Amino acid sequence: MLEVRAKLPAILSEDSNNTDVGKGNSARAETTKYYPTWPGIWLMGNLGRALFSSSTARMWPFSYNECNESVFNSSNQRISACDSDPGHGLNPNQGRGAVEIDLLEGGGVAISSSIQIAPGMPQDYRRAAINETLGDYSYCMYSQQCATVGANLPGVPTAYYEELGHQSWYQGLRYGSNNYCAVDGNDTQSYSLVVAGMENITENSCDLLYCPASNDVHGDMGYIDDGKALGHWNINSNGTCFPEMNGYQGVFLCDPDNQDSRCSAPRNDSTAKTNTMEAYNYQMDALSANWGIHMGAYYDYVAYQLEWVSGDNGYLRWMVGGHPIFEIPAESVVKAPQGGSKPNPRLTFPEEPSYIILNVALSAAWGTYPPNPGKPCRGNGKDPEANFICDSFPLYMKIDYVRLYQDTTESSTMAHECDPASHPTRQWILDHESDYVDADNKLVEVHGGAPCRDYTDCTIPFSVQYIFHTGICNADTKRCECINEFWGGPRCTFQLGATTANGKDASEVTFGPPLYAAFIVLGIVVFLTFVVFVVMTIRHRRKMMKEASKEKEFARMTYVVSDMKSSKVMSSRDSAMAIVTPNDNDDGEPDTRSSLVSGPYHRFR
């Protein structure tokens, strides 16, 4: 769970003419122009770097792990499940991407909480396309003013969408009240009346009398957390601020040279190709809720939370102060409607390792914007209100804390860093470094600096119980300091030996002694091993020779004793069997021997 306690940027001085000022924390923000910035607290998949199009092209916001060319052209996804040998440390046949999850974005009178995901649904499963001949314009659906039947909201009117023969858009999304807002009796709904009205909506737009407060007729209408105490999802039973399904439901993404008519700016035949990137075109979907904000979000700090459970049974839940505002069950994403002329891609519920972004931006096209967008802020300088707003810049989003809660028990399957074995990212980024940096945003190695309480906040986890640590906590500054140049990251938990910012090879930067020293040690070890082997061999041979000598002597004594005993026995039994032979030193005297001298005894004569 990600929790950020923040105060959003606003112009709230007494002399600002902001009519929202002084109404109290529970008052609803209504004066859009005094909230001219676009604050954001969001997550981005680690394989994509925000604002670096070379890293996000064909990467953002994919969450797709299928290989079926009849459903989706795999060439549009940079890391596709169809690739059995992707290299760069990636897993084979695993589709990857950079999903975007927005805890909050935007300001003014409403905040948006959303995910962006791809590939999106084909047109068969989307809102009806507008018919410009009826006078409809591109953004008429935001105010439900489109004349084209079915172009304002998915599922409205009932008869039009039932005739399609299949469901449209994402089913079962959940919406809850922002009860920090003041109650407005005109917004209070009755569950039974709304359910009855939804049976047959004949209008081309929604109303609180016959539609859910979210305007999402496909949303979950069950009890919040299966308990009656919190009421029903999708029903504004309290009459407080309530999220509405965002009219923005995504965009068709294309490379600059693409001529697909669905592109926002397709290249015409008279324009030369730029050849700046590989060709692609695909639909991106935005599952988004806009919810009314109370003035307390601008006056004071408010805790915004995002609970994220991955897997087919998971969910994403957005909360304000612990109260659910919006929820996307995994089933809504992985079980997309089917039955149209073209199959719907089966998405993966977001599971990419992601990083956190906190930023404040300006825009000329979003829900809030400064005076005179696209021109000097003050325009001609004659509008006092515009001058006052422009004089109030810069505006800041203030952060009290950012907290990330994760399950660290042994049974947990949750990854705790951005390069898990299930979804590697590090080697890909190193091998495509130019996609993630530019002249103004170079690769910078970080050596410590994170706030800490003691050394356990500044070292790799498994080293805490040992003497060796990768960093220390400075007692004076209460900031992490890495023990040497080979450990980095804010908490000194990142190994810098493999690759460095100045381009040194891994063999030149290591955690141990220099390479030549390692070879010297290796040589000594090999030599000593050889000496020991020779000594042991010599000792073994000596031992064998000594044992052989003993056996030989034992055998000699055995034969001698045996022959002598046999000779005595034979001589005593038969003295007539003497043989007369000449003596070697013939002295004329006969030499008498036993007939057994032909035996082995002669060898010792």
Image (spheres, rainbow, N blue to C red):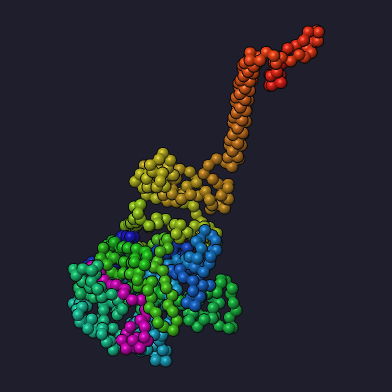
Numbered range of the magenta stretch: 155-181
The residue shown at (43%, 68%) is: 63
Is the stretch drawn in magenta largely helix, strand or loop? Answer: loop
Question: What residue is shown at x 33% (from left), y 70% (from top)?
Answer: 328
Q: Is residue 516 left or right of residue 470?
A: right
Foreground residue among 113 and 350: 350
**From this viewpoint, is residue 67 visible?**
yes
Q: Residue at x 31, y 73 (%)?
A: 173
268 up-or-down from 572: above or below? below
Image quarter in which the N terminus is found: bottom left
Quadrant containing the C terminus in the rendered view: top right
Q: Is residue 37 visible?
A: no
Q: Quadrant of residue 378?
A: bottom left
Q: Of residues 75 and 335, which is closer to you in this image?
A: 335
For image coordinates 38% across by 43% down, the residue present is: 464
In percent of width and height, residue 525 lies at 58, 35
Residue 153 located left or right of residue 25: right
Q: Position of residue 553 (x, y in %)?
A: 63, 20
The part of the image, by quadrant, that contains residue 34 is bottom left
Nearer to me, 185 or 557: 557
Name the residue furthest bottom. Answer: 133
Whole-percent x, y for residue 156 in the image: 32, 85
Magenta span has 164?
yes
